[in-house]
Amino acid sequence: MKVLIDKLYTHNYLSREELLTLLNSMTENDKEFLINKAHETRMKHYGDKVFMRGLIEFTNYCKRNCMYCGIRAANKYADRYRLTIEEILEACEEGYNLGYRTFVLQGGEDDYYGDDLIVMIVEKIKQKYPDCAVTLSIGERSCKSYEKYFKAGADRYLMRHETASEELYKRLHPGMTLENRKKCLRELKDIGYQVGAGFMVGLPNQTNEDYVNDLMFLKELEPHMVGIGPFIPHKDTPLKGEHGGTVETTIIMLALVRLLLPNVLLPATTALGSIDPIGREKGIKAGANVVMPNLSPLSVRKKYALYDGKICTGDEAAECRMCIEGRIKRAGFSVDMSRGDNTAWSRSS
């Protein structure tokens, strides 16, 4: 296994068969070796920097019915909200004053925020904070819509593919197709965004073959960012009784992605911190180099509940920043508040 890990470290590639062999046969020593190699790779490309992004969860309305998600359209218990433009700008101002230079606008697939409104929000943020990056995470839209947002100044777009296995995707996403998801990601990349894909770990009936499908798709797409987090059940969804994903498997996937895509921006997610008190620190030590503290108004934090047990829903933005900064430093890394672009990307490319 160490020969395979060394090969991955050196060439940033393994075949489908080799990846499956690795996942099926790794010992604890092999896992430790893998994590060390992932850490070496991130240090080579980004040093000890961990980039901070300010997350603004601006709507929990969603027209989709993804089986695992707490804000799915069919969840009649969800306490719905939408932030106004003014509230979004206030969150940006607070974040800017705290040093953030990237704002991540995340929401459900909410048609209330049509193209004109999204363009207006992006333009207002970029006019007021021209030195900041704006990231959108608002799901599947048309290529023309994506072009409008990019023209307005949006720099990045996050949209996890969730799983690259056709059957598993179909079971979890009623009325949606993996083919369209992939099409959207490719369009976003062609337009010029820094694109984020990614997948969940520990979904019901997910296998090592499924993880290999995810890893091979990511290698083919070569996104600038990859979000990987454990599946955590939500009490008001069809998957409420299922077991969640583990820290250990999530960490292995983070390390493998770091080795496959050495330049990638790789978050240590809130979900990882929600299932283990030091989950994010473990992720950072395995190659992750981004964290996204919450800038959403306190009044809505608990309402953006994709899964149960989400941490940091009661922290003020300043508290949140200081807490995570302390954690990053204690783990032996440094905080970087800059835009933190992917080292292989430029807007003109």
Image (cartoon, rainbow, N blue to C red):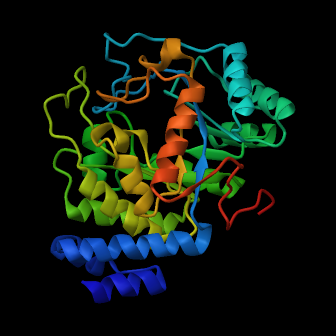
Quarter placement of the N terminus? bottom left
Against 275, residue 28 (above or below) is below
Residue 331 quadrant = bottom left
Q: How many marks?
A: 0
Position of 19 compared to 198: left or right? left
Camera-side residue of 94 and 86: 94
Position of 115 compared to 21: left or right? right
Camera-side residue of 261 and 312: 312
Against 103, residue 168 (above or below) is below
Camera-side residue of 133 and 62: 133
Image spot of residue 244 (x, y percent): 21, 41
Q: Residue, x 60% and y 71% (percent of image)? A: 45
Camera-side residue of 167 and 317: 317
Against 290, residue 32 (above or below) is below
Q: Residue, x 39% and y 60% (percent of image)? A: 254
Residue 209 quadrant = bottom left
Camera sees residue 200: yes
Image spot of residue 24 (x, y percent): 17, 72
Image spot of residue 210 (x, y percent): 26, 59
Quarter placement of the C terminus? bottom right
Position of 184 compared to 92: left or right? left
Image spot of residue 10 (x, y percent): 46, 86
Camera sees residue 182: no
Against 192, residue 105 (above or below) is above
Q: Residue, x 30% and y 89% (percent of image)? A: 3
